Image (cartoon, grey):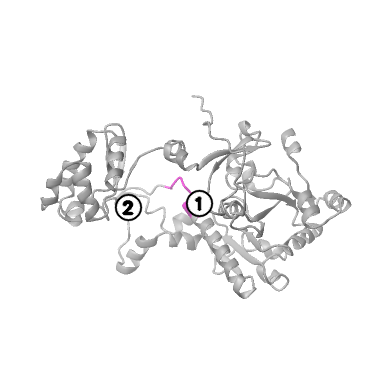
Amino acid sequence: MTVSAPELPLRTDQPSGPRPLDGVRVIDFTRVLAGPFGTQILGDLGAEVIKIENPLGGDDTRMLWPEPGFGGETSFFMSLNRSKRSVAIDLKSEAGLEVVFDLLATADVLVENFAGSVMPRFGLDYDSLKERFPQLIYCSVSGYGRSGSNANAAGYDTPLSAETGNIALNAYQDGEPVMGAITYTDISTALNSTIGVLAALHARDRTGRGQHVDVAMFDAALANLSFLGAGFLATGQEPRLNTQRTAGPSGLWETADGQITITSGNPKMFVAFCERVVEKPEWLKDPRFATMQERIQTHAEAFTAELAPILKAQTSAYWSERCKGAGVPCGVLRSAGEALLSSEASERGIVFNLPHPVAGQAPVIAQPVRFSDTPCQYGVPPVLGEHTNEVLSGLLGYSEERIAELETESAIACGSVDAAKAK
């Protein structure tokens, strides 16, 4: 079976005017997922993000599943590194490190997501920089944080999700846990790093000082336990997946052509569901279904036996329209592709392509935050070292001779779109 990329709107122009983070410069040492996802948000919001990459290959995800249809570029990398400029510097070179220090002298924020032992090796840890650059906000994204017995341990989403109980919750009672497809620990860590940087920028406006922002995947994953974690701390009872715990009806229901989820989370919604969705007002007077407790625990089987055949008689679209019209939360069960290509996604303009000089087009899932006066703008994901020359000459004032000397010494690498096309 041949599968081709879906046709998406091509966005060739961007909103004009100011952006939320105009004037903020970020030196980005991150790679793979949790770090780059967070710095991409900053870039979309208008920060100037200068991504420091190893000249020998760059970010790990540049080589992860390269796609011939994208000219050898990878959708993985492009999904995490738009709105950035790529500068290729060898941190093991003394001359390369001097370039980094010159960049930091112009920067507001540094973000890194190495293991704890890496940045000190180059004199780029917070303690080494805080006196030299007192206004610098230094954000460390790591598996276990910069303190504790695991401070130097590597961290990836799946192991951290396992250690923090997140994977264990992806299981029905007496069933085996299932590793989730979406990297929630990576993504929530990225979001928390962005929140931390923004808060530190705001604090610096008052104090004039930068600070260290320590964001651990372990901490983020524990925080994701939210009310389930709080329930355990209050009662000692281990939480588990239970679709009938907090609403009734809730969970997945079979329809004539698929499945739909319904979450009737309060008495008002249940009244609307009975009267306007399934047209069963008599259920409101039935003592078996009168309260949430009765519906989802004491008489759950009886309630399911009454409701299931009704929902099975009509399509998912039919029930979705009726639920939404009645103010009852619901959702048709879709694949990821169906959701991305849905009419709702189209109406919101959240999925589109950007022109890309090597890949042809770079798919974008837009930021979910909308601004009325300072909208996001989306930059094309860079090729490796594409902006080395531009940044060193334009921002730092290096001469052509100095840049050529650094490149000869292999301290830097000046990439280009033409070179990437020729690969």
Is residue 405 at all visible to an observer of this figure? yes
Callout 2, which amino acid? Leu
Q: Residue at x 65, y 48 (%)?
A: 59
Q: Which residue is mark 2?
A: 241
Residue 370 numbered mark, or none: 1
Q: Is residue 275 above or below residue 96?
A: above
Callout 1, which amino acid? Arg
What kind of element bears circle 1? loop
- Mark before the other along the chain sequence, 1 or 2: 2
Q: Residues within 10 Å of mark 1 (few under 14, many from 20)?
A: few
Decide which of 246, 84 is in the foreground and name it. Answer: 84
Distance Cα–Cα, label 1 vs label 2: 33 Å
Is residue 423 at all visible to an observer of this figure? no
Q: Which residues are magenta?
A: 179-185
What kind of element bears circle 2? loop
Residue 163 numbered mark, or none: none
Percent x, y for residue 170?
37, 50
Residue 182 within the magenta-colored segment of the rendering: yes
